[in-house]
Amino acid sequence: MYEGICHKYTLLFILVCLNLLYGILRLSCGYNHKNRTFLLTSGPSGPKVEPMTLGRPLAYDPDKALNAAMQVFWSQGYEATTLQDLLQAMGLSKSSFYQAFSGKKELFLRCISLYREKISQGLAELLENSVSGRDFIERMLLNSAAEARRTIDMRRGCLLMNTATECAQKDRDIAERVSSGFAGLKELLIQAVRRGQTEGEITRAVAAEVLAGYLISSLGGIKTVVKGGADEQRVCDIVAVILRALD
């Protein structure tokens, strides 16, 4: 009986020692506790535990990767763009892609938002630097006409308008993101029209909101004929007709 008790406590002692040894090894190699990683180091007063930084630095620039993806979607459209197209343009592995962006649709939604931000910023600066509201509208429309100088295969149009035509009716999330983009563009055009009305260069007989909607529709038409192969002079003639509606 005595030998059995000794054997039992010997096993218990061995288990305790093994647990202590396991704990020491975890501390010496670093361990994770409640999402924090620690490392056992030496200090002036003896061993101490210090927090470690989780993860490795990103091996790519997220902003550049997102912009590269936007360029691909803008050139090829959403459905025609493959995962391999995106990985090649962004310089990412498949695992890094899904870790950073979750999937193709999630990435596309972020690209639409980025495109909207860039367009809004560019147009806001153009409006601020224009001599009048009407001058801003004319310059904006002629900028679209300038795309006709490119070869047909390089004419990309507007990502928002391309997406609205391609897949906005098929996906609610994409439709909402596109609608938000158009709302921002319309608000900027309302500001330009009201400025032009105050300056006496745009008619007050039509509400600014209505004229802004008309200009968005006209802009969409210009983008369409340019992608269809129209030359710059033809587009400039169309812009002249559009501007007469503001008189």
Image (cartoon, helix red, strand yellow):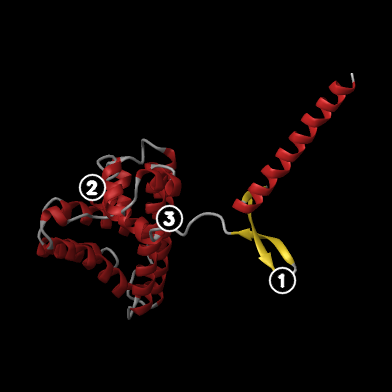
Asked if residue 2 is positioned above or below residue 26 in the image, the reply reads: above
Tag 3 residue: 183
What amino acid is found at the position of numbered circle 1 in the picture? Pro
In this rendering, the label closer to the viewer, 3 or 1: 1
At x 80%, y 31%, the residue is 10
**Would you call the spot at circle 1 few (<14 residues within 10 Å), some (14-19), or many (20 or more)?**
few
In this rendering, the label closer to the viewer, 2 or 3: 2
Callout 1: helix, strand or loop?
A: loop
What amino acid is found at the position of numbered circle 2 in the picture? Gln
At x 41%, y 65%, the residue is 188
At x 15%, y 65%, the residue is 236
Tag 1 residue: 44
Q: Earlier in the sequence, mark 2 or mark 3?
A: 2
What amino acid is found at the position of numbered circle 3 in the picture? Ala
Give how far across and how far down residue 106 sits, in percent.
42, 45
Tag 2 residue: 76
Q: Earlier in the sequence, mark 2 or mark 1?
A: 1
User: Can you see residue 238?
Assistant: yes
For this orientation, the residue located farthest to the right is 2
Give how far across and how far down residue 2 sits, in percent.
90, 22
